[in-house]
Amino acid sequence: MIEIPSDLRKDLVPLAFLLGDWAGAGVHDFPGSEKCNFGQEVSFTHDGRDFLEYSSRAWVLDENGGKVRPLESEHGFWRIDADRKVEVTMTRDDGVIEIWYGELADQKPQIDLVTDAVARTAAARPYSGGKRLYGYVKSDLMWVGEKQTPEVELRPYMSAHLKKVVTPEDVERWAKALPDDMPDDGIAFFK
């Protein structure tokens, strides 16, 4: 279920499906890098201004799903205009700063992004651009990323399946919103 906060700016409502804290796992595979499974925590928040704030932390997982070490971190800001065009500015821990542009799909919560500009520090690995696809599928957030370098053509390198993180505050808010006439046995509710 997509919740739209009452204090979310009207122009950001099309991005409401991203809001919240997400956690899950995925696969990382790119030439010259370690192929691995990874865990990820993603957060999309808003503070009343005309953007969503984004942060992501990913770490390498061992064969039992335990954290081994950090993989990558990102931080950015997502905006959308009246024509459903999405703009993302993003900074990554590896010394890359990107500007992404894309579009919110018609009639479904899906965003396709492509890099428009890339800046790298001297310490950053070679990188020349990428594509990403984010989608809200059966209440989960899924994404796939592609990247290219001067040596490697554009190809998929990461994808993840994330679930919404439920907090005690969420449970309390949902409990307060339950109707007073809920059936005691729970079964009658579904009849």
Image (spheres, rainbow, N blue to C red):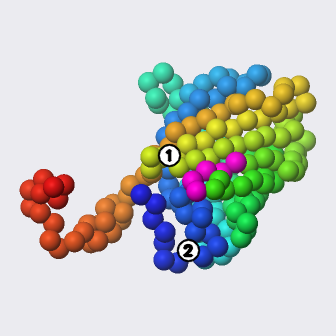
- Asked if the residue under mark 1 is in contact with the one under mark 2, i.e. CB atoms within 8 Å, the reply is no
What is the secondary structure assignment of the residue under circle 2?
Answer: loop
**Residue 71 among those drawn in magenta:** no
Q: Is residue 45 visible?
A: no
What is the secondary structure assignment of the residue under circle 1?
Answer: strand
Task: Give the mark nearer the N terminus: 2 vs 1.
Answer: 2
Q: CA distance from mark 2 to mark 1?
A: 22 Å
10 Å crowding of disc 2: few (<14), some (14-19), many (20+): some
Residue nearest the viewer, comparing 62 with 1: 1
Depicted 169 relative to depicted 132: above or below:
below
Image coords of residue 11 (percent x, y):
64, 73
Q: Name the residue: 60% across, 76% down.
A: 10
Image coords of residue 161 (percent x, y):
52, 39
Label placed on residue 8: 2
Image coords of residue 39 (percent x, y):
53, 37
Residue on which disc 1 sits: 137
Residue nearest the viewer, comparing 159 with 68: 159
Residue type for callout 1: Val
Magenta range is 107-112
Mark whose residue sits in front, 2 or 1: 1
Q: Quadrant of residue 87?
A: bottom right
Query: Left or right: 87 with respect to 124?
Result: left
Q: Name the residue: 12% across, 57% down.
A: 188
**Residue 108 among those drawn in magenta:** yes
